[in-house]
Amino acid sequence: MLQIVGTMNRAGAETMLMNLYRHMDTAAWQFDFVYFMREPCDYDAEIIQRGGHIYRIAPNRKYVPLALQWYRLRQLYRLLKHGRHYAAVHAHTLNSIGCCLLAANLAGISRRIAHAHSTRDGKGNSWRRRLYHHIAQWLIRINATELVACGRDAGIYLFGRRLAGTATILPNAVDVAAFAKDRSACKTRLCAELGLSADTRIIIGQVGRFQPVKNHAFTLRLAQHFREQGIRAHFVFAGTGPLQEQIKHAAQQAGVAAGISFLGDREDIADLVNAIDVLLMPSLYEGLPLTLVEAQAAGTPCVVSARISREADLGLGLVRFLDLEAPEAGWTDALLAAAAAAQVPASDRMATFRRKGYDIGSGVRTLNHIYENNPAV
């Protein structure tokens, strides 16, 4: 099984895929990966340890976008035509999925799976981008034999409203048991790690790469508001990315750097989301963010942007949506109220995840079904 992913760093779609890979029967389905970058990625060592192969398709020189797509198509075709035999190709690369599956189709791969993970590509809405998106949809329509989406909204964006109804919904499943931890103990360890004083009223966490869609600048404004109101709050940012140094500098300029910890990439996400009082997610858009699912598995209250798909709320009473245009005071009040809310028992969380198909066992069964029963669209 060849997974086309672009990269395998610790981000939502990539971590979801690794969650499934760890629980799949590799005697039946072994995963290999295609990256569209040369740099090492966070999950490389684990993939290789599990028996997977990694192929990197990245040119030595810079191409304009159309030429880059042609380069990738040609190299992917050669890999599939003359390399190892694959029962299926499973592509996760948003608008370039159609081009990837065209290469697979030309190479004679009979199972070609398109997987939607987002509700937008974040590259504007010019007529060129709209045209590119329509072409991408058309290429998916004529080359995919199966459509998969993390949620309904993501499916509508990538496949169009008509075809989205035929897509299999594969929720961003997690190992719920791994998030059932002693929240008090996790918070104590994090406070000790960060040297936080006992009078810190609330710890607010934001988990995600430092890129425009995650809207870290908005969080800095909230940090300023907490300071102006005299509320002892501490913010933790987990993740890395191209805007990290810019956000650090902005925090210094705004005078809030002392109240923010930049944690970098973390492998202990289950401990981290249990340690914080509230998860903050002011994203400009999201499909069905894995971090939000993980926080609910941990029983952590979440205050999130109204631009995030409502499908991400699993109905446990842990998620509150707010408009990004709402005043900082409204967000501050929501965060404080969320931190003070009653906890949801682990048994209720587990039952809800199983009922809605967000536990890892349900996710593996759904993916097995997709791979075993792959009809033509």
Image (spheres, grey):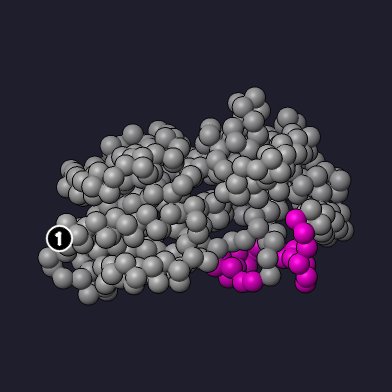
In the image, is residue 10 above or below residue 3? Answer: below
- Image quadrant in which the C terminus is located: top right
* Residue 10 visible to the viewer: yes
Closer-to-camera residue (36/294): 36
Image quadrant of residue 219? bottom left
Closer-to-camera residue (20/321): 321
50 inside magenta stretch: yes
Which residue occupies 32% across, 64% down?
236
Left or right: 296 in relation to 133: left
Q: Main secondary structure of the magenta part?
A: loop
Q: Position of residue 375 (x, y in %)?
A: 72, 31
Image quadrant of residue 118? top right
Which amino acid, by three-letter code, is at mark 1?
A: Gly
Residue that numbered label 1 is attached to: 230
In the image, is residue 204 above or below residue 134? Answer: below
Badge 1: residue crowd in 10 Å (few <14, some 14–19, many ≥20):
few
Q: Secondary structure at mark 1?
A: loop
Closer-to-camera residue (353/23): 353
Part of the protein shown in magenta: 39-65
43 inside magenta stretch: yes
Which residue occupies 47% across, 62% down?
210
In the image, is residue 262 above or below residue 164? Answer: below
Which residue occupies 34% across, 60% down?
220
Image quadrant of residue 262? bottom left
Q: Position of residue 13 (x, y in %)?
A: 54, 51
Q: Position of residue 136 (x, y in %)?
A: 72, 41
